[in-house]
Image: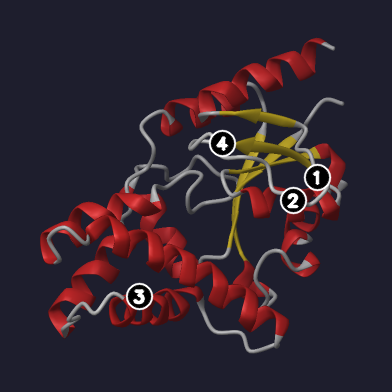
Amino acid sequence: MIMQAIAFDAYGTLFDVYSIGTLAEKLFPARGAALAELWREKQIEYTRLRTMCSMYKPFWEVTQDALVFACRKLKLELDFEAQNALMGQYAKLQAFPENLGVLQQLRAMGLKLAILSNGNPEMLDAVVRAAGMQGVFSHILSVDAVKKYKTAPEAYQLGPDVFGLSAKNILFVSSNCWDVCGATWFGYTTYWVNRAGAPLEELGVTPHGEGRTLIDLVGFLEQDRSN
């Protein structure tokens, strides 16, 4: 089936959420990596809890709450200055090095590109600008529009609605296996950017494609077009 559009997850897929560990390490020597990992874990956990309980809060606030908890859990003294620095860094996360070139290549192939993210609009606009990706995406979609986080069906429905296509004709791309599973259940054709070489989640879901970087995604799409 030839794909007509691609919806990308943002955090972890286009932008490296663990790149913030460099700043965290400067602020908390020998604890930066642990903080980055726990911060991310709690951030995702809080999105799930809030969606399950219909207690939506914008992703920026959820991210800040997760940072405060992670520092308390690790017994790190998070003062106002350190908190502002870490949150400010989150607004300009590094993009993975191959991404901009691949995205431009995909546009040249005639594909429509979008971001479909848990991030609220202000966060996404800031990180896209910081990465020099302005004008690359036809749409930047935030779950803030439906006040529910992925993996809620309402969040995934944003893609078909904006593209005017069925989910199966849209390739959903994420580095988060849980996100790939949710998107597959919803009905998307899915591609897992398995940067860490992680095992597949035991959820009875197999993505339609898998690779280690976005460069591998190009090969998957070229093969799709040749079939």
User: x, y (%) of residue 156?
Assistant: 74, 59
Given contact means CB atoms under 8 Å apart, are the residues at marks 2 and 1 in contact?
yes
Identify which amino acid the numbered label 3 is placed on.
Ala
The tally of labels here is 4
User: x, y (%) of residue 37?
Assistant: 38, 59
Q: Residues within 10 Å of mark 3 (few under 14, many from 20)?
A: many
Q: Is residue 160 above or below residue 221?
A: below
Label 1 sits on a secondary structure element that is loop
Q: Residues within 10 Å of mark 4 (few under 14, many from 20)?
A: some
Residue 159, quarter of picture: bottom right
Q: How did the renderer colour the structure? A: secondary structure
Residue 45, quarter of picture: bottom right
- Residue under the point 44% across and 33% down: 99
- Residue under the point 80% across and 53% down: 160
Label 3 sits on a secondary structure element that is helix
Q: Which residue is mark 3?
A: 70
Given contact means CB atoms under 8 Å apart, are the residues at marks 4 and 3 in contact?
no
Identify which amino acid the numbered label 2 is placed on.
Cys
Q: Which residue is mark 2?
A: 181
- Residue under the point 70% across and 87% down: 54
Q: Which residue is mark 1?
A: 205
- Residue under the point 52% across and 23% down: 215
| Lower position in the chain sequence, tag 2 or tag 1 | 2
| Lower position in the chain sequence, tag 4 or tag 2 | 2
Quarter of the image with the N terminus in it: top right
